[in-house]
């Protein structure tokens, strides 16, 4: 048995709180940034380059999951070279265009370089090695979950989501078919505590988070975008860990490096 180091996961922002969502995922040749957000009150801006060092210039794609500032607001303060491909759904691009000031040439330029793909349209990153698909996330118009398939592995980043699992809608059925048996699930946890913060209708509630985890049966979970916890036990983690033997459930901390291994 050989353990091979294949990559890493880092929450640049928005790991252990809500705001500045930006997650770096590396798997062999693939280097991808999932969202690039600002704090909701614009109080601070993440510095992707500082966190990633030389990997910053090697990014294959920057995915923007939806048009909320805590997921895209940091784009304009992080200098992305022309070789950086920013990608979103067409509705998300349109919404960002509407929300941002129109008289700033640099901002306009960055927005116009965004590549767009529709839900279920497959596109490639890292020399065709990684296959990426946007799936409807149910959170706001244009919001997407990002499915990454690489080297026979399946990784899902939910972004903010509110997905009904029990519906006969063809697009839900199609989505569910694609996200079964994940290797890695990066899941938002706005409502991951049964008690405490009031549930928001735009985000999956505790039971929906639990159902999605059960349904996708991942080997590893990174819980991000959660309300600040005060060191108390996480009920979702406890419930999942008591029911699944092999599962690793990580409550992500900003800037911590989580290595992803594979066993041969
Ligand atoms: Zn949102
Ligand atoms: Zn959010």
Image: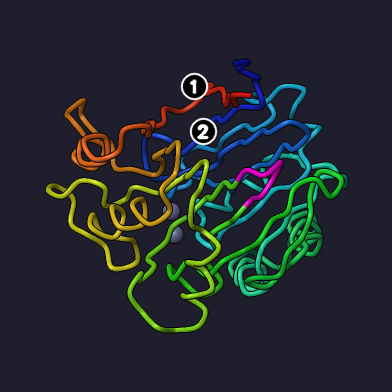
- Crowd rating for badge 2 (residues with CA inside 10 Å; few <14, some 14–19, many 20+): many
Residue 256's tag is: 1
Residue 196 within the magenta-colored segment of the rendering: no
What residue is shown with label 2? 11
Q: Nearer the viewer, residue 136 or 248?
A: 248
Q: Residues within 10 Å of mark 1 (few under 14, many from 20)?
A: few
Q: Position of residue 229 (x, y in %)?
A: 24, 33
Q: N-terminal of the two: label 2 or label 1?
A: 2
61 versus 180 height, above or below: above
**249 to the left or right of 154:** left
Q: Main secondary structure of the magenta part?
A: strand
Q: Position of residue 177 (x, y in %)?
A: 51, 67
Q: Which mark is residue 69?
A: none
Q: Residue furthest front?
A: 1
Q: Reply yes or no: does residue 152 show up in magenta.
A: yes
* Residue 152 % position (x, y): 67, 44
- Bounds of the magenta segment: 148-153
Q: Are marks 2 and 1 in contact (CB under 8 Å)?
A: yes
């Amino acid at each position: 048995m050989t353990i091979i180091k294949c990559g890493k996961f880092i929450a640049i922002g928005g790991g252990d709180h809500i705001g500045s969502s930006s997650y770096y995922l590396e798997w062999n040749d693939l280097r991808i940034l999932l969202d690039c957000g600002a704090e909701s009150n614009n109080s601070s801006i993440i510095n992707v380059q500082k966190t990633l060092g030389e990997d910053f210039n090697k990014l294959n794609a920057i995915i923007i999951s939806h048009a909320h500032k805590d997921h895209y607001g940091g784009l304009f303060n992080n200098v992305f070279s022309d070789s950086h491909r920013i990608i979103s759904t067409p509705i998300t691009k349109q919404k960002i265009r509407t929300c941002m000031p129109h008289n700033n040439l640099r901002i306009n330029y960055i927005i116009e370089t965004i590549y767009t793909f529709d839900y279920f349209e497959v596109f490639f990153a890292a020399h065709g090695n990684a296959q990426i698909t946007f799936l409807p996330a149910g959170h706001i118009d244009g919001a997407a979950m990002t499915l990454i398939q690489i080297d026979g592995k399946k990784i899902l980043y939910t972004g903010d989501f509110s997905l009904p699992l029990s519906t006969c809608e063809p697009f839900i059925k199609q989505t569910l078919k694609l996200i079964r048996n994940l290797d890695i699930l990066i899941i938002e946890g706005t409502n991951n505590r049964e008690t405490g913060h009031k549930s928001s209708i735009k985000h999956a509630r505790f039971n929906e988070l639990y159902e999605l985890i059960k349904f996708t049966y991942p080997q590893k979970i990174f819980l991000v975008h959660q309300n600040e916890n005060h060191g108390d036990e996480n009920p979702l983690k406890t419930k999942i860990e008591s029911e699944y033997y092999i599962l690793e459930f990580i409550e992500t901390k900003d800037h911590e490096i989580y290595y992803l291994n594979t066993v041969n």
